[in-house]
Image (cartoon, rainbow, N blue to C red):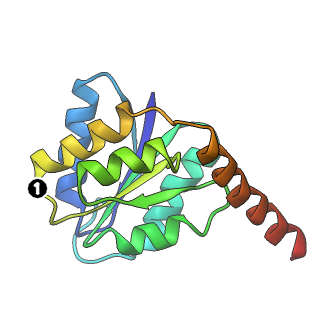
């Protein structure tokens, strides 16, 4: 599985760590995160990761900023993206199991080991389908309706 990973300046260090761990576990990583010094704008890096996913070059994405909130808001502006802001393993489990989240957003203050457990849970939890598929499909239809109205 290929994973797009992006971050702003706040998430740079955690992103680099996550990338290394995921690579060591056999995941393909497409790193589109900030590499400079100083500050940058998180929507730019959410867009880069989302484009990789929507183009089909990656199946999922991980986005990191100071709180994860900005990345989540930014990523969810793109049709076809279901970004979940996750703070613990339980949230990661349900983001995958019930919401079929294809992007995981994390705050940079989340510890390294906790972040790896969160990502592992999200990657290894299958989508349940059933009534949850019906709900995800409703979201997809709303996205399509909104696009058609423009």
Point out the image quarter for the C terminus.
bottom right
The percent coordinates of residue 101 (x first, y second) are 49, 49
Q: Is residue 111 left or right of residue 90?
A: left
Quarter of the image for residue 123 reads: top left
Quarter of the image for residue 53 reads: top right
Residue plotted at (39% across, 76% down): 41
The percent coordinates of residue 112 (x first, y second) are 12, 50
Point out the image quarter for the N terminus.
top left
Residue closer to the observer: 11 or 122: 122
Residue closer to the observer: 41 or 66: 66
Residue closer to the observer: 86 or 67: 86
Report the label total. 1
The percent coordinates of residue 77 (x first, y second) are 60, 69
Quarter of the image for residue 27 reads: top left
Residue plotted at (69% across, 48% down): 134
In the image, residue 133 above or below residue 72: above
The percent coordinates of residue 147 (x first, y second) are 82, 68
In the image, residue 136 above or below residue 56: below
In the image, residue 59 above or below residue 82: above
Mark 1 highlights which residue?
Answer: 111
């Amino acid at each position: 599985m290929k994973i797009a990973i992006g971050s702003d300046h706040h998430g740079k260090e955690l992103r680099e760590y996550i990338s290394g761990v995921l690579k060591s576990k056999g995941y393909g990583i497409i790193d589109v995160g900030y590499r400079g010094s100083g500050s940058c704008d998180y929507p730019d890096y959410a867009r880069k990761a989302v484009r990789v996913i929507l183009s089909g070059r990656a199946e999922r994405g991980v986005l990191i900023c100071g709180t994860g909130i900005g990345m989540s808001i930014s990523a969810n502006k793109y049709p076809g993206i279901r970004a979940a802001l996750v703070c613990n393993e339980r949230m990661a489990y349900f983001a995958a199991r019930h919401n079929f989240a294809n992007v995981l957003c994390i705050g940079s203050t989340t510890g390294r080991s906790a972040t790896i457990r969160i990502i592992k849970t999200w990657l290894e939890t299958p989508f349940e389908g059933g009534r949850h598929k019906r709900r995800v499909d409703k979201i997809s239809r709303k996205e399509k309706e909104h696009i058609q109205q423009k």
